[in-house]
Image (spheres, helix red, strand yellow):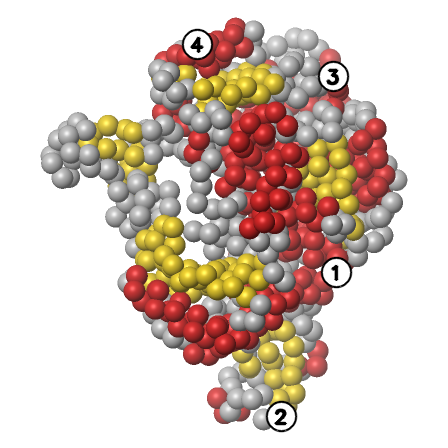
Amino acid sequence: MTGPILRIAVPSPLHQIFDYLPPPGCDPATLPPGVRVRVPFGRRRVVGFLLEVGADTTFDSAALRPAEAVLDAEPALPAEALALLNWAQRYYHHPPGEVFATALPVLLRQGEPATAPRIPPLWQITPTGHAALADPAALRRAPAQRLLLEHLAQCPEGVEIEALRPVVHASTPTLRALQNKGWVALIAPLLQSEPVAAPVSPMQRLALNVAQTAAIAAVAAELDRFGVFLLEGVTGSGKTEVYLRLIETVLAQGRQALVLTPEIGLTPQLLARFRERLPGPLAVLHSGLSDRERLNAWLLARNGAARVIVGTRSAIFAPLQTPGLLIVDEEHDASFKQQDGFRYHARDLAVVRARQLGIPIVLGSATPALESINNAQTGRYRLLQLPERVGGGSPPLIEILDVRRQPLTEGLSLPLLARMRVHLARDEQVLLFLNRRGFAPVLFCHECGWLSQCRHCDARMTLHLRRQRLICHHCGDDRAIDPACPVCGSVDLRPLGQGTERLETALRREFPTVGIARMDRDSTRRRGSLETLLTEIHNGDCRLLIGTQMLAKGHHFPDVTLVGIVDADQGLYGVDFRSSERMAQLILQVAGRAGRADKPGTVLIQTHHPDHPLLRTLTSQGYPAFAEAALAERREALLPPFAHQALLRAEAVDSKRATAFLHAARALAEPIADGLELLGPAPAPMERRAGRYRAQLLLQAARRQDLHRFLDRWIGQLWAQRPDRAVRWALDVDPMELY
């Protein structure tokens, strides 16, 4: 058939584009790529992406169905975002419909109109409010109102309500009370549609040191061209201030900046500093927002009203009207890699997007990924270093505590408890890091040895005592705590091991008068709870901080002078070749929370392996020495970044079917696998998860182009033959987890 044919990416796990006839009454010549189109798909009606209008089709014309409606007058995504998605689809060899759907907010995927965004109003202090603030008696019995008024007095241009939540927890009712008195008012924000000569900055700028000045100058000199800058700065060295100065320069040119951060836990403090320093509305994109909030932020970024966009992994796809700078904070963090569905790496896509846009990108970290260090050594990236803490602060003293043969109180040694008492007596803060949430990793029977095994996974169920539940942290299954052993009937069931909840319980007994804050995924589940915890920590209400990696990265706690790593051993002997790198990064990131102000900091690492070479290298020589040694090992073993990998994963309700599928896939691969090494099939390290058995086939090549040339042919053959349709399979290019 000849004639206009709409080629549409339909959100489905199918590795193909679908042909449709134009909707009745639609002129295909007016349809640009990137508009959303509602189409029939099987028995469903779905929203797809128009990729192009073709002149013919290879299918039977009688079998083609017409699209139902075109949903956009102009493309939902600009041309540069479409170029990024097309590149990502080819590189990761993922079904195109799922790739394009990933880039859209949920409501747009469901067909909702992309209407004009709502600009959040600003709260501003009134002249009457200034007069009340000057009257000592007016706010004597309203400390929360005084706090808000004092903050607003420092921000004459107005503040969004989101920026006020860290100041006062119950900010909304407090603001309403102030509004009823006429002391504050809501105003419409001024949009920065033109370049700003000087950024609005109610907060006094921090003085720059020589290294910060040099880093800012290096990037600012390249704002009109592509370049990758690896900003390696020790914790507390002022990387955020470098980001802010560069963003201010970009805003002065009338352009936008996109900042990626690895976790929601890092965004409140970062956003607070950004809102204090940068003009105009800020777009925030992360999974903690409602669908409506995400859509509004996405639209603010697309129409240019938001000059700065801050978000987690998926924000890399945010549309930008006038892009000027990309920043990836904590670039080493593994959470930038999507671990299911479309398995992209946001940091790597950010580099590709910057190259396509012809703008610079800054990758910041105190402990850069080994891949990034190698890229800097080979000249692909330009290394910028911040070797000193701002304000002349010294790095914390790191000590190894040998806990062999020592009595432990819920995992805490007597030397650690003694040091904690010393620091708390000085009214300082202490941070304890334990990367296991819940009360205990397992419940066991003291009579027969039964363990709380997950019914669906090869994993133990974690005891969450406060919720009185056993929860699997892999598949999410949960059940009530067994009243008696299901094997022998004994009621002598005991928790085994420590989690953050158990640590908190023990510390409340040891330090009954000290305020304690626990930060993990359980304690921050409710909306606003993270901001509340951070406010209590900064106000000094909580002087003992307990948490998982949510607490360990990026936060600035100036009163923390002692950091205790409760159990360093869990990451020393991992099955993945990246385990030692991740543990080194995590130890130094946690250690970086100590002594960030004018008070010296100390880090105590509890371990049963005090002579482990990783710990010795980190404590005596630091991360650069560890990275050099680790890269040398990777080079000898021909592991990334000196080789390039892809992992074919298969899962089925029967372990034999998953393995048989991969054997068939390997048989297809062997005749065309020139320059490749095929490893497997083999069961995944956790073979059974969520009731399905998993196996994997690892592909490795010395040259990236050989790997992708092979994948182009192999995935097409695999999709065409589909050895067993009951088996789910997925390809992971550049895998970060081999389980």
Residue at numbered disc 2: 2
Secondary structure of the residue carrying tag 1 is helix
Residue at 70 percent of width and 57 percent of height: 353
Secondary structure of the residue carrying tag 4 is loop
- What is the C-alpha distance between the residues marked 2 and 4? 80 Å
Identified by mark 1, the residue type is Gln
Residue at 77 percent of width and 45 percent of height: 382
- What is the C-alpha distance between the residues marked 4 and 3? 39 Å
> If you read the primary sequence from the N terminus, does the residue marked by circle 1 or circle 2 appear first?
2
Secondary structure of the residue carrying tag 2 is strand
Q: Nearer the viewer, mark 1 or mark 2?
A: 1
Number of the label disc, if any, that sits on residue 131: 3
- Residue situated in front as seen by the camera: 127 or 557: 557
Asked whether the residues under the numbered discs 2 and 3 touch, taking CB atoms below 8 Å apart as contact, a structural biologist would say no
Residue at 61 percent of width and 60 percent of height: 702
> If you read the primary sequence from the N terminus, does the residue marked by circle 2 or circle 4 appear first?
2
- Residue 270, percent across and down? 65, 34
Residue at numbered disc 1: 356
- What is the C-alpha distance between the residues marked 2 and 3? 76 Å
> If you read the primary sequence from the N terminus, does the residue marked by circle 2 or circle 3 appear first?
2
Residue at 67 percent of width and 72 percent of height: 33
- Which quadrant would the N terminus be assigned to in this image? bottom right
> If you read the primary sequence from the N terminus, does the residue marked by circle 1 or circle 4 appear first?
1
Tell me: 440 left or right of 107.
left
- What is the C-alpha distance between the residues marked 1 and 3? 53 Å
- Residue situated in front as seen by the camera: 8 or 652: 652
Asked whether residue 733 is in view, the answer is no
Secondary structure of the residue carrying tag 3 is helix
Residue neighbourhood size for the residue with mark 1, other residues' Cα within 10 Å, grouped as few (<14), some (14–19), many (≥20): some
Q: Nearer the viewer, mark 4 or mark 3?
A: 4
